[in-house]
Amino acid sequence: MIKSLFSDDLPRSVVLSVILGVILVCLALAPFLFPGVRTVDTAARICIFIVLVASYDLLLGYGGIVSFAHTMFFGVGAYGVALALTHMGRGFDAIVVGALSGAVVSAVLALVIGLFSLRVRAIFFAMITLAVASAVAVLVSQMSGLTGGEDGLTFKTPRALTPAFKFGGELFGVKLNGKLLAYYFVFFGALVLFLLMLRVVNSPFGRVLQAIRENDFRAEAIGYRVVYYRVAATCLSAAAAALAGSLYAVWLRYVGPDTTLSMEIMIDILLMVVIGGMGTMYGAVIGATLFVVAQNYLQNLMGAAAGLVEGVPLLPDLLNADRWLLWLGVLFILSVYFFPTGVVGRLRAGR
Amino acid sequence: MTAAPEHAPKMAQASFAERIGPWMPVLLVPVLCVLGFMAIPNTSSWLTLTVSGLAMGMMIFIMASGLTLVFGLMDVINFGHGAFVSVGAFVGISVLLVMGHMTEAPSLMLNLLALLVAVVGAMIATGAMGYAFEKVIVMPVYGHHLKQILVTMGGLIVVEQLIIVLWGPEEIYINRPEALKGAITFAGAALEKYRLVAVAVGLIVFGAMRYVLRRTKIGLIVRAGVQNGEMVEALGYRLRLVFVGVFIAGSALAGLGGVMWGLYQEVITAHMGNQAMILIFIVVIIGGLGSVEGCFIGALLVGLMQNYVAFLEPKAALISNIGLMVAILMWRPMGMIPVVKAK
């Protein structure tokens, strides 16, 4: 049962299994274990980013393709739900329509970009996605009639998912309201998507992708059409990213260029994948959790450290809470050199 | 044994299409100018737009040329190239700010001298940084595209953050040197002086690069290295050293481009390099990776396209360049002047 649920790709390390178990339990019971608006928000962000990072890992870690347009697909999904909820009214049917159309649009976009660049050489893909993604981000902020421009869109989700909706009283001191349902909507959505992706990478299709990553020339010689597999991986990962974006839109009840399309999020995703471990879906879980928690809490720590070294030239600036990306960048470079398999690879090797 | 087939050379002239083929990319630039002329009703605004498009193209070329050569020579793709643009701009502008008394003086000579000092300062800084970047970041990942993209992107993040640490997070607004402010009127069209200077600098850089690549021994080695590196090494040249030299030169050029780009926009931010990278990548792709001439033509096309479309339909400016890239890739999948064989 568990074996087939995890598609026969178990963590294969005691420490890793324990960590993953703890993360799963914490996320599953987050509203009860850590009641509080900010902590539950953090937990929901972790769930969504796990899916987003896992879908990126499908491309980068399994396919060996670098894309800089992943936030674009994420944004397409988010805007899909936002537009559907704005124009169709606050029903669950609008969420489904928005999420599905977002996923389809993303996959088609990925297909077009992939056919254009991947058929020539894989390296074009990275450059072209960078250009296209930034053009789309600019376009979205300019088309203010449709997308709300820089301000984004605020919309209403189904009543059952809003804090105003109450059922029953309290359970373990937690109010049973729509916000709780919204959290579990995000949590189970993320869980299903994650298991689906785990299924994909452990299918024969996933094996071929790994073969192409290791040696595309040889894979082609064995008889696999490398371009088709790469394009298919791009489309799948784009659709999954769009669905993650839909979950994000449902959770935030807001979409805007900064929260979904910005280059900063793209860089965050890259850092999460590499630090967690490329080429393992579990790396996405570890990377996203570490990163989101660090993003929320490490900055306070750095601020405290900066306070300690006040008076020393330059050091307070380097340790400024806003400069945490600097240290993550250094960590990123070091981990690409020394731990290309990330935290998960380390744990598995040290078993 | 059969006899060797009759040797029958034909003395037919190459068809028109064959003769025009290599020149097609060059012809695209005047073609685009004419198209713009037809689309834009007013001659004087067409002239203004053409000059600013050429100026923009020249600056993009200066920034992009290093990237394309580095790729052609060592198959290294540097996503951190934008960092040199930012650093060049910040160093150059800082020098200009220090020499405020020279830039505010209304004398053209003093202004140009200050600009020259700023440019040299920026080029030395970015050249040195390029050396360090090559040694620390790029060297360990030769021959591995995926890691190159990731590591150079990481380098870009670190450099951007370091710029913020050193210069502060606010954007810096700058004034152009006194004599380069304003515009001259030519045939009823207002031409900004600074853009004319940018066109001149771009032409000089392109001429110098072409001279070095076509007429000197080092240029010969570089061009041969782009075509077949192994063979050049077999002949006893240490391509590694040549490559380091090209990387430094490319970084210094990116720094020069950064100073000019900063003065063009009159505001600099730590992220300006990353934003410029979008246009740089489009240029490098449509020009053909590894080709300096292709890069030059591509940059002019992108600059002209951006300015014409921004005038006709402001919202479509960036999309139009994506469209240009798509059109050119459909015509020639490897770029206009492909140099490097598909690897």
Image (cartoon, rainbow, N blue to C red):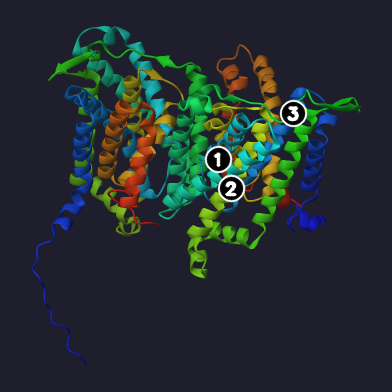
Of residue B98 and residue B38, the one placed in the foreground of this image is B38
State how far apart marks 3 and 1 are (Cα): 27 Å
Residue B24 left/right relative to B287: left
Residue at image x 18%, y 22%? B44
- Residue B224 on image: x %, y %: 27, 53
Q: What residue type is labelled 3?
A: Arg
Residue B210 left/right relative to A147: left
Q: Which amino acid does label 1 sit on?
A: Phe
Mark 3 vs 1: CB contact within 8 A: no
Nearer the observer: mark 3 or 1; the answer is: 3
- The tag on residue A237 is 2
Residues flagged by tags 3 and 1 on a common chain:
yes
Residue A78 versus residue A156 in the image, above or below: below
- Residue B22 on image: x %, y %: 20, 52
Q: Mark 2 vs mark 3: which is more N-terminal?
A: 3
Local SS, label 3 = helix
Regarding residue B188, the answer to whether it shows in the image is: yes
State how far apart marks 2 and 3 are (Cα): 31 Å
Residues flagged by tags 1 and 2 on a common chain:
yes
Local SS, label 2 = helix
- Residue B136 on image: x %, y %: 49, 39
Of residue A72 and residue B201, the one placed in the foreground of this image is A72
Residue at image x 73%, y 56%? A9
- The tag on residue A73 is 1
Q: Tell me the residue that label 3 is attached to.
A: A159
